[in-house]
Image (cartoon, rainbow, N blue to C red):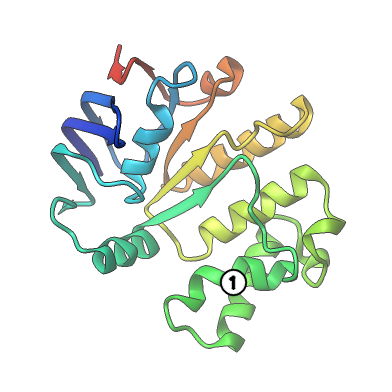
Amino acid sequence: MIELQNIHKSYITQYTSLHVLRGINLSIENGEMISIMGASGSGKSTLLNVLGLLDRFDEGKYCIDGISTNGLTMQQRAYYRNKLLGFVFQSSNLIAYKNLVENVALPLYYRGISRKQRNILAIEQLDMLGLKDWATHFPNELSGGQKQRVAIARALIAKPSLILADEPTGQLDSSTAIEVINLLKEINKKGTTMIIVTHEIGIAQQTNRIIKITDGQIE
């Protein structure tokens, strides 16, 4: 599914250069559920951005689903992000002026699917996550846990091969966090590969494998 070989990434400004990733080697199989842990500034978020085709790397090789990402154009990266990846963030990043159906359906808009069809699919996805009755509500009417379930529905609607979750329980109370991580585990059991960045050891221990990063390198 994923193969990273000797990945390096630096951020360069006018006055300084920060070497964030220092030779990352990592293999992830189809259907795995792994967590990435590390202190603030360790490089875990940069690694997630590289995996999500949001950041380019300076050196090394990254293949996803048999596709080499080296040399992809901006348009090609956007195409593969939409085709292969789903994202869940610490903040649900829902659009405040759109209802839940419109929020969940958004990834399908970029695939050119008709409004009628994408709304049907969005309602089906909300139903699967127990939110069908809230379909016409707006994000400000939801609890934190409900917002994250909507964000997960949005990540799932395009049937991605891989979900990248960046601190998905970071803003939730402990009981709601358990509810969300159990939902992600159920999705993983159906075959979706899952990578979760977290600073919470209790969340990390729910995954199949923990990857620890220190100073831009895997321990």
Is the N terminus in the top left, top right, bottom left or bottom right quadrant? top left
Q: What residue is rendered at 35% in x and 58% in y? A: 84
Q: What residue is rendered at 50% in x and 68% in y? A: 107
Q: Say if residue 214 shows up in the picture.
A: yes
Is the C terminus in the top left, top right, bottom left or bottom right quadrant? top left
Q: Is residue 179 above or below residue 116?
A: above
Asked where in the image residue 184 lies, by quadrant, the reply is top right
Q: What residue is rendered at 68% in x and 63% in y? A: 95
Residue farthest toward the right in the current orientation of the protein: 141
Circle 1 residue: 105
| Residue 52 horizontal side relative to residue 158, left or right | left
| Residue 35 horizontal side relative to residue 12, left or right | right
Q: Is residue 208 above or below residue 152?
A: above
- In this rendered view, identify the residue nearer to me: 122 or 200: 200
Q: Position of residue 44 (x, y in %)?
A: 40, 28
**Badge count:** 1
Q: Is disc 1 surrounded by few (<14), some (14 to 19) or many (20+) residues within 10 Å?
A: many
Q: Is residue 160 above or below residue 32?
A: below
Q: Position of residue 52 (x, y in %)?
A: 36, 48
Q: Position of residue 218 (x, y in %)?
A: 29, 17
| Residue 196 horizontal side relative to residue 217, left or right | right
Asked where in the image residue 208 lies, by quadrant, the reply is top left
Q: Is residue 175 above or below residue 150?
A: above
* Amino acid beneath label 1: Ala
| SS for dot 1 | helix
- In this rendered view, identify the residue nearer to me: 205 or 110: 110
Asked where in the image residue 72 lies, by quadrant, the reply is bottom left
Q: Say if residue 32 shows up in the picture.
A: no
Q: What residue is rendered at 77% in x and 69% in y? A: 135
- In this rendered view, identify the residue nearer to me: 35 or 71: 71
Q: Position of residue 40 (x, y in %)?
A: 49, 20
